[in-house]
Image (cartoon, grey):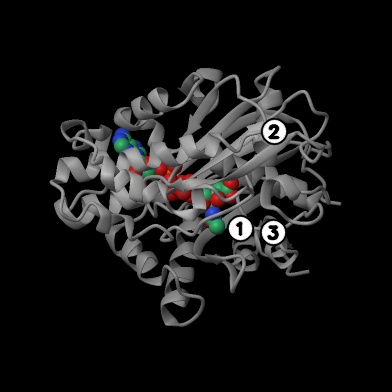
Amino acid sequence: MLKAKSGKDTLRALGAMSGTSLDGVDAAIVETDGTVITGFGAHAYRPYTGAERQCLTAALGQWFGPQVEAATDVIDAVHQEVLSDFPDVDLIGFHGQTLAHDPRGRGTLQVGNGAVLAQALGVPVVSDFRSSDVELGGEGAPLAPFFHFACAKWIGAQAPLCFLNLGGVGNITWVDPRQPAPEAEGALLAFDTGPANAPLNDLMRERLGLDCDFDGSIAMQGTVETGALELFLAEAYFSKIPPKSLDRNDFSEMIELVRELSDADAAATLTAMCATGVAAGMTHLPAPPEKVLVTGGGRKNPVLMEMLRVSLDCPVVPVEDVGLDGDMLEAQAFAYLAVRVAKGLPTSCPSTTGVGALVGGGLLSQPDGK
Ligand SMILES: Nc1ncnc2c1ncn2[C@@H]1O[C@H](COP(=O)(O)OP(=O)(O)OP(=O)(O)O)[C@@H](O)[C@H]1O
Ligand SMILES: CC(=O)N[C@H]1[C@@H]2OC[C@@H](O2)[C@@H](O)[C@@H]1O[C@H](C)C(=O)O
């Protein structure tokens, strides 16, 4: 059993996430015994350079070969750089970068070498969080729900609520904080809601050379094309019963639905598609949530937030409203999950990934290679 440097049961874990938006690496400290969060600590963000992002983008959708190797080198080098700045760390949770995700087919691939990182930083590292869940028949995603359960306890929630993460892909976790543990029957339901920012970012880059529709300034000037929205909603994914998950580019053909529209109308319509996917997802929840706490970069887009407020039947607020950090929640999740893996606790269950049993997914690498 991994021991904290302090000798206590609580570990100081550092989590790192490179998400589907390919914007950079988030890193954050969480103090936890693997069940209860006792504190949040320092954090950092390192954006990718243009060349690094190009290298990662070129490898998306690939399972092996020189582009995957080049992407792995970028992930390893940038993580070593970012994570070496944190002192007194007991354990690292290294998500790496998802390059391909096909849980019912070829599996799931997160690149980033945990053993190399452990050796370079002299700290035990948990990596490859998703593979064992997929091998046991699960979706391998989303994995943040067990952490969301701990967050719900940490904020003192007394009624079911949702965490909605709007990164490249959207994912929602319905949590009943009255349950004793995340794996308890009725404690969690989680799934990917649909595409979030990825198609909009791709459109902005393709047409305007921008990284994203910053503050929704383009969509704000446009009108939603309802015909395109209806075609999008007719996709079988939205009526599929969860758990279910997506790859970043599963909906990349969405851009075709807005191809003929002006920049503003296309941006408004892609933004509406994200909100509509979430609204469709709400119909699958076991009970209405008290509120939806929004995390991830999409919460900074006022057009998207307004569309969500109009479409959902409950308050929709950024996670900052309850004292959490929406830029760091995913990095914190992998810090928390790393401690669970090190302590032999589960990180997913039937209601979060559809896996048949409880799974504690992740590979623990020691700095001495043992
Ligand atoms: N001010 C803003 N206005 C509009 N959109 C924004 C703003 N800030 C961030 N975003 C969007 O949020 C995205 C980044 O979100 P986030 O960091 O949550 O993604 P991620 O962690 O890569 O994704 P995932 O959760 O899918 O792994 C950006 O690419 C952009 O599309
Ligand atoms: C396969 C994969 O990397 N999935 C990511 C992606 O990004 C958002 C959504 O799709 C979610 O399912 C997941 O990430 C979050 C952190 C999760 O596992 O909870």
Q: 360 or 172, which lies in front?
A: 172
Q: Give the amino acid at mark 1.
A: Leu
Q: Which residue is drawn at 60% across and 55% down?
A: 94
Q: Do the residues labelled 1 and 2 touch (CB within 8 Å)?
A: no
Q: Which tag, 2 or 3, sits closer to the chain's start? A: 3
Q: Can residue 298 be seen in this view?
A: yes
Say left or right for 28 vs 188.
left
State which quadrant residue 36 falls in.
top right
> At label 2, which amino acid type do we have?
Phe
Residue 361 placed where, x, y %? 73, 57
At label 2, counting other C-alpha atoms closer than 10 Å, the crowd grade (few under 14, some 14-19, many 20 or more) is: many
Which SS class for mark 3?
A: loop
| Residue at which label 1 appears | 121
The quadrant of the picture occupied by the C terminus is bottom right
- Which quadrant of the figure shows ligand 1? top left
Q: Do the residues labelled 3 and 1 touch (CB within 8 Å)?
A: no
Disc 3 crowd rating (10 Å Cα; few below 14, some 14-19, many 20+) is many
Q: Is residue 25 visible?
A: no
Q: What's the distance in space between the residues labelled 2 and 3, CA to CA?
A: 19 Å
Q: Name the residue under label 2.
A: 149
- Residue at the outermost bottom position: 65
The disc, 1 or 2, on the residue closer to the chain's N-terminal end is 1
Calculate the distance from the C-alpha at mark 1 to the C-alpha at mark 2: 30 Å
Residue 357 drawn above or below residue 38 = below
Residue 295, image x, y percentages: 48, 33
Q: Which of marks 2 and 3 is in front?
A: 3
Q: Name the residue under label 3.
A: 138
| Residue 284 spot, x, y in % from top left | 60, 38
Foreground: disc 3 or disc 1: 3
Amino acid under label 3?
Answer: Gly
Q: In this view, does 190 lie to the left or right of 343?
A: left
Closer to the camera in the image, 76 or 223? 223
